[in-house]
Image (cartoon, helix red, strand yellow):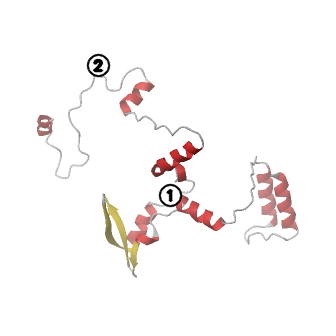
Amino acid sequence: MNAYLAYVNKAVEKGQITLPEAMSVQHWKNMRNKLGRVKWNVNIRNRYEYGKGVLAYLGRYIRGGAISNKRIVSIQEDRVSFRYRAGEKKGNVMTLPVDEFMKRYFLHVPEPNTKVVRYYGLYAPTAKEELSECRRQLGQQPMKEADEIDWQDYCGYQSKEHPELCPVCGRKLVRLMDIPRQYPKGPPDWKRLRSAA
């Protein structure tokens, strides 16, 4: 990396590389010195002949945006109409004022340095068959599905005491009912709910 920085530095000094307007030569030297102290692992390969295609392919996975252009139905001076999906039903159209649409849009834009891609390509959850075929061709066993465990078993692995045991009597706790998250008509009737359980 130091050889690369030295090469770039010579090009800057000879005027072969134009620095950005806001960057002085001194600022470049300071930045170069800082980068020279960092350990780099540089792997330079021949460029792809179809580089634009690779860029478009990766761009769809990495920075697809909060909404695709084809979902936007129309844009007027003060309104935006777009398609959305509600459950299994596709093709619903919603129209919002521009400021409300932008507010909702920016709620889906990740913060800088946020990891937004978990798995893509052959490792995407929808490509299990393709991944298995590739592994078969390479003489490898199919990927094993991870065993799903519930929170009780997970907590049990972490400590000797099972999380569903009463700390006083040691008996297993008994689930009577689910407690609803919202109460639009006031608090629930606990007696009626208990009798239904």
Query: What SS does tag 2 mark?
Result: loop
Query: Compared to 2, does 10 lie above or below?
Result: below
Q: Which mark is residue 168?
A: 2
Q: Which mark is residue 48?
A: none
Total numbered labels: 2
**Amino acid at the residue labelled 2:** Val
Query: Compared to 81, does 193 lie above or below?
Result: above
Tell whether 134 sits left or right of 189: right
Image position, residue 50 (x, y; %)? 66, 66
Residue at the image position 26 percent from the left and 26 percent from the top: 173
Which residue, as the protein is rendered here, is positioned at the far top? Answer: 169
Query: First in sequence: mark 2 or mark 1?
Result: 1
Instruction: Name the image quarter holding the C terminus.
Output: top left
Query: Can you identify the residue that label 1 sits on?
Result: 110
Image position, residue 56 (x, y; %)? 58, 65
Observer able to see residue 185: yes
